[in-house]
Image (cartoon, helix red, strand yellow):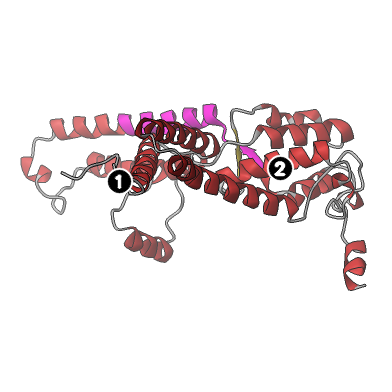
Amino acid sequence: MSSTHSQSHVKKIEDYRAGYPRYTALLSAHVPFFLCRRFNRIRARVLLLKQNKLSELEEQLDQIDRDERRLLLLGSNRLDTNADRLSTLAEIDSSLADYGTLKCNISSICQIFAKIWRIPDEFVDRSHRMLSLDVAEARDIESLQNWLNGTGCITREETAYLSQSRELVRLAPSKDFALSRLEIWVEDALIRFYSKFRKSPQFDLSVDPNVYLYSGSLIKQVARALLLCLITFLLLMPVVICNITGSTSVRIFVIMISTILYLSILFSLTKSRTMELVLAGATYATVLIVFVSGQDDQPLLKAA
């Protein structure tokens, strides 16, 4: 009784007025919809501008040092009374603070000082963090474009940012990439082959028949079960096949095919780097060889 009562009071997206109130309600209903542009081109333009300004100040400082006739002033900051040099150094200090923050090897100390002095996030650091964000999924971009085209509640000029797919990044924290891929596959499969799926009470965030925002846990549970079965299959099937056959050549062939299959799935479902793939493949093949060789009187690997 209480669950039914609570579901009836869930505020729908269409309960908000058309325009930005409804659009922001849609974005807040699905975290991956939080997308924004990185503005790569103008960010690079500003970066080059700041860099060029620092280069000019550097040349200006070098020229002042070359023109200095009193060598004693170049060897002591305390005795330096050259107004031009002091003014240029002050301007360089200000420009460097705007260009980027000082890097520190001891992160904990830097964090403490940042909290005490409230060091701002400067341009280079902000750009680094922005460029480190994950690229937006084409699926999410297309969903927002379809919704906007269907409702027309936001002007085209203010939704044109969605057409800049190469610059769009997602603000949502990164999830397990493999599990995320499987969740998308499971959702598409359920929508295509299970007609009652979209009529379940988990689609309770919108009354629009063309809007499907799933809020249940079925997709995650199925995806995790598939991932578990896949991992178990990759780890145990080669062992089972090698135990069935007694031919050493067949066993080696099975291990090769299993390793190739394992690396292919790992490459397609994860964002692994080259070295990570090499280590994963070496570990997988070594475990299989050692395990399988121990099941026979004639091992594949003979101790020296």
Q: In this view, does 24 lie to the left or right of 11?
A: left
Please provide percent x and percent y for residue 156. Answer: 79, 29
The nearer-to-camera label among 2 and 1 is: 1
Residue designated by label 1: 297
- Tell me which corner region of the image, top left, top right, bottom left or bottom right, holds residue 23: top right
Alpha carbon separation for disc pair 2 and 1 = 44 Å
Q: In which quarter of the image is the N terminus?
A: bottom right
- In what element is the residue under mark 2? helix
Q: Give the range drawn in magenta.
A: 35-56
Residue designated by label 2: 186
Please provide percent x and percent y for residue 185. Answer: 69, 39
Q: Quadrant of the C terminus?
A: top left
Q: In this view, does 222 lie to the left or right of 50?
A: right
Q: Which of 169 and 185 is in front in this view?
A: 185
- In what element is the residue under mark 1? loop
- The secondary structure that dominates the magenta segment is helix
Q: Is residue 130 magenta?
A: no
Please provide percent x and percent y for residue 216. Answer: 77, 55
- Tell me which corner region of the image, top left, top right, bottom left or bottom right, holds residue 65: top left
| Tag 2 and tag 1, C-beta contact below 8 Å | no
Q: Nearer the viewer, residue 115 or 242?
A: 242
Q: In this view, does 267 lie to the left or right of 222?
A: left
Kind of residue at disc 1? Asp
Label 1 crowd bin: few (<14), some (14–19), many (20+), radius 10 Å:
few
